[in-house]
Image (spheres, helix red, strand yellow):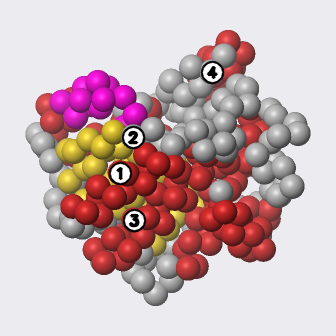
Amino acid sequence: MPDTSDLSDRTVLLTGATNGIGRAAAHELAALGANLLLVCRDSERAEQTRDEIAARSGNRRVEILIADLCSQREVREIARQVVDSGRPLHVLCNNAGAMFDRRLETPDGVEMNLGLNYLSCFLLTNLLRETLVRSGGGRIVNVASGTYKQVGRLDFDDLESRNDYASLGAYARSKLAMILWTQEIARRLDGTGVTANALNPGLVASNFGQNNGLLLRFGMLLMRPFSRSVEQGAETVVYLCASPEVAGVSGQYFEDCAPAALQAHATNREDAGRLWELSEQL
C-alpha cells in the first residue's frame, strides 16, 4: 500500500468498526496514531475491539459511540455528541453497511439497504459537515461497492424497491446512491478544504451477509475462495483516510488505492442532484 501519514494529530470517526474491513481499518488507523471514534451497534463487541486495538497498537485513544445507524434518531444523537464535545474531526469514514435477503424497513420507514448503506451516511455527514470544515483539511471516505455496475440508473419512482425487491439489486442501488452522492457533496464542498471520495474494497472474505438467510450465506461461502482478506479490503480505506497522496483529491472513485473509471450512470449529475433533494426529504 502507498505511504500513509502519521495520524497522531488527527481524529477519525469510523462506522462499522467491529467487523470485516471496518475492524481491519480501525487497527491500521490506530497503528498510525489516530484518535479514533468508533461507531458501533453492539457494545460488547465494541469493547472487545477497543481492547484488541490497544493491545496490538499501544494506542489507547479509542472512544466508542454506540448507535444503530438504521435509526435517524440515533444517528442524530452521535452527531450531537461529537459536535457538543467541541473536538476537531478530520476524517469521517462511512463504512457500515449490510445486505438484506428480504425487504425490511428502518424505524423511520425507509427500505433497509437504502436507509443503512446510504441515507445514514448522508445524514451523519451533513450533521458533521461544519465540524469537518472548521477542523481543516477534512476527508469524507465512503465505502461503496463495485456492485453498482449490476443496476442501471436509479429509478426515482421506486427508489425503495417497493415494487420489485431483490437483495443484490437493492444493495447495489444503495451503493450507486452513495457513489452519486459522493460526487455531489464533493462539488458542494469545493473550496472548503474538505474532500469526499468513494471506494470499492473489492470482494472481501468477511462475515458480510452471514445473518441474512441461507441462500445469501451460501452464495458468500461459494465466493470466499475468490475473495481477498479483510486486511487487503481495508487498504484503500486506510489510504484515503491517511495518505498525503490524495490530499486535495475529491469527487473520485478508487479501487486498489488508485482512481478508477465509473460507468456513465454513476456519474449522472442530474441524478446526483435529484438524489440529494429526495434524501433531504427522507
On screen, residue 83 versus residue 247, left or right, reads left
Q: Are marks 1 and 3 in contact (CB under 8 Å)?
A: no
Residue 252, position in %: x, y? Answer: 57, 67
Which amino acid is tagged 4? Asn
Q: Are marks 2 and 1 in contact (CB under 8 Å)?
A: yes
Contact check, label 3 and label 4, Cβ < 8 Å: no
Compare marks 1 and 4 and give the one earlier in the sequence: 1
The label shown at residue 67 is: 2
Whole-Å distance between the Cαs marked 1 and 3? 10 Å
Res. 192 visible in picture: yes
Splitting the image into 4 quarters, where does residue 12 fall? bottom left
What range is drawn magenta here? 40-51
Task: Name which residue lies at 62% across and 65% down.
Answer: 280
The residue beneath circle 3 is 128
Res 162 quadrant in image: top right
Using the image, determine if residue 188 lies above or below residue 203.
below
Bin the neighbour count of mark 1 within 10 Å (Cα to Cα): few under 14, some 14-19, many 20 and up.
many
Q: In 3D space, how far apart are the residues under numbered discs 2 and 1 (Cα atoms)?
A: 7 Å
Q: Nearer the viewer, mark 1 or mark 4?
A: 1
Q: Earlier in the sequence, mark 4 or mark 2?
A: 2
The location of residue 192, given as percent across then percent down, is 42, 83
Please tell me which of labels 1 and 3 falls first in the chain.
1
Q: Amino acid at mark 2?
A: Ala
